[in-house]
Image (cartoon, rainbow, N blue to C red):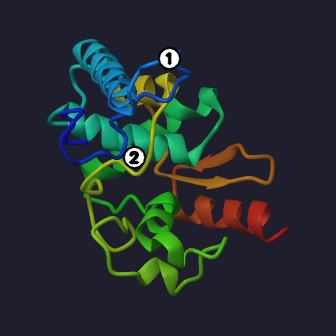
Amino acid sequence: MKLANVKKPYEGYFWPDTYQINYGDSVVSVFKRANQMMREKLDYEWQGRDKSLGLKNPAEALVLASLIEKETAHNQEKSEIAGVFMRRLKKGMRLQTDPTVVYALGNQYRGSLSKQDLKFNSPYNTYRHKGLPPTAIGAVGQASLHAAMHPATGDTLYFVAKKDGTHAFAKTYKQHRYNIKKYLKNL
């Protein structure tokens, strides 16, 4: 990273893509290109962001985009998830997003999260700490980056993954508890 002139944090600062590598190209040159591409995409999205967005800088937007990326593979939901996260941040609520716990656990993660895992002490654990984690938790794609800077309006504050990989959104905690029973515990 030093040779590529990439400064910490590294997570999220490389654009995931297929790169043509020519004979004689160094590993450093590939990292430089991926980092430069990420910075260009981030800057472009930041310049065109929703101006009422409550994020202070592009780095925060990248962190938010990484949470969105880890929450859903469904591009049509990304903006709605971004909206939930932004409303929760604005209200001072914890984000309580499982991917941050998985990231915090690292090699200790065993494929599913327990109630004990949600108590894991890490600045990345958004069940314990309010606000965004200190850095991104993974690479982001274009849809997540765009969604982070253009969150959907609305009043939903909760979502839960359904068995098909999409999410059920809820305005109230009562409705959210119902969705958990319906989609995760089979009513």
156 to 146, vertically: above or below: below
Task: Give the residue at x 71% y 43%.
Answer: 166
Residue 107: assigned label: none
Label 1: state its secondary structure. loop
Task: Give the residue at x 42% y 83%.
Answer: 119
In the picture, measured across the screen, residue 56 lies left or right of residue 166, that is left
In the picture, measured across the screen, residue 91 lies left or right of residue 141, that is left
Looking at this rendering, what residue extends furthest in the right direction? Answer: 186
Looking at this rendering, what residue extends furthest in the left direction? Answer: 56
**Of residues 25 and 177, the one drawn nearer to the viewer in this rendering:** 25
Of pointers 1 and 2, the one earlier in the residue sequence: 1
In the picture, measured across the screen, residue 70 lies left or right of residue 42, that is right
Task: Give the residue at x 41% y 21%.
Answer: 25
39 to 13, vertically: above or below: above
User: In the rendered picture of this protein, how many numbered marks are placed on residues?
Assistant: 2
The x and y percentages for residue 98 are 52, 63
Which amino acid, by three-letter code, is at mark 2?
Answer: Phe
Q: Nearer the viewer, mark 1 or mark 2?
A: 1
Q: Which residue is mark 1?
A: 23
Quarter of the figure that contains the N terminus = top left
Crowd tier of the residue under label 1, counting other residues whose Cα lies within 10 Å: few below 14, some 14–19, many 20 or above: few
77 to 177, vertically: above or below: above
Q: Which residue is mark 2?
A: 85
Which amino acid, by three-letter code, is at mark 1?
Answer: Tyr
**Of residues 115 and 37, the one drawn nearer to the viewer in this rendering:** 37
The x and y percentages for residue 37 are 35, 19
**Of residues 10 and 177, the one drawn nearer to the viewer in this rendering:** 10
Label 2: state its secondary structure. helix
148 to 87, vertically: above or below: above
The x and y percentages for residue 6 are 21, 36
In the picture, measured across the screen, residue 171 lies left or right of residue 145, that is right
